[in-house]
Image: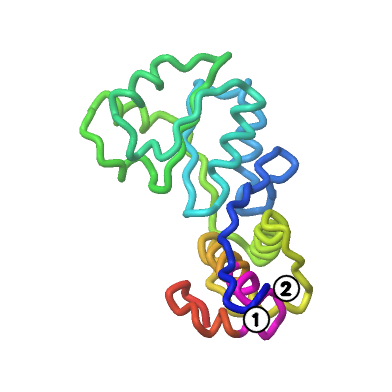
Amino acid sequence: MSPGQLPLPLVYAAAMGEADFLVSDANRDAVRWLETWRDWPRPQAVLTGPPGSGKTHLARVFEGRTGARVIDDADAADPETVFHAWNAATADRPLLLCARPVPPAWPHRLPDLASRLAATPLLTIRDPDDTLLAAILAKHFADRGLRLSTEVAAYVLARVERSFAAVAAAAAALDAAALDAGRGVTVPVAREVMEAQFDLGLD
């Protein structure tokens, strides 16, 4: 990079294929339930989990496999739309509602919808374990075309907040720092980022 040249922010596409979804104890129950959709007691399900946990990725894989209707951020969607989608779901075209909070916390005021959601199976993606955090960090790097060394991975994972969102934020910050420096992500680069990113919950 020449002196004074500004690094351009790159738009990257996360790998969202079925083979790119990472299965661990945090999401295994949800994955198994979606795999057995033909045996569901009713053709609807709710998928919840923390930010960055892969809800949208898993929902898109499910949609591609089954032709299901998927509503992201269902807690913020028009309740009438959700209500009619729930009623329209069939065994051949099930409905998957995705949201961060569980349905009792959704801010709608439709008693008929509330009663339906109360009877809908709830699938939950739990907080990640160390193995999944490491795999997610590696995926974020791979999505950006970055090399993640064992040393950098160990350094970051020992200091990052134990959440999907914090790992994603750390990867983005490391990518930006490496681009700005015109070099790869090294331990010194990681140290600078980790010491500066207090807003990410990093040490």
Is residue 175 covered in magenta?
no
- Residue drawn at (62%, 43%), measured in percent from left and top? 29
**Residue type beneath disc 2:** Gly
Horizontal side of 81 relative to 138 (left or right) equals left
Instruction: Give residue 10's position: percent from left, percent from top.
Output: 60, 57
Comparing 202 with 192, the one in front is 192
Question: Percent x, y for residue 168?
Answer: 56, 61
For the residues bearing labels 1 and 2, Cβ distance under 8 angstroms:
yes
Which of the 4 quarters of the picture holds residue 78? top left
Kindly identify the residue that appears in the image at 39 percent across and 44 percent down: 102
Q: Secondary structure at mark 2?
A: loop
Q: Point out the stretch of residues depicted in magenta.
A: 176-191
Q: Relative to 3, does residue 100 appear above or below in the rendering?
A: above
Residue beneath disc 1: 189
Amino acid type assigned to the residue bearing label 1 in the image:
Val
| Residue 189 belongs to the span the image colors magenta | yes
In the image, residue 23 sits, relative to residue 175, either above or below, namely: above
Residue 192 point in image, percent of width and height = 58, 84
Residue shown at 58% from the left, 14% from the top: 92
Q: Give the residue pinned by disc 2.
A: 184
Res 184 → quadrant: bottom right
Badge 2 crowding class, 10 Å Cα cut-off, few under 14, some 14 to 19, many 20 or more, is some
Q: In the image, which disc is placed on residue 11?
A: none
How is colour applied across the structure in the image?
rainbow
Q: In front here: 9 or 54?
A: 9
Q: Quadrant of the N terminus?
A: bottom right
Q: Is 192 rendered above or below residue 101?
A: below
Label 1, secondary structure: give it.
helix
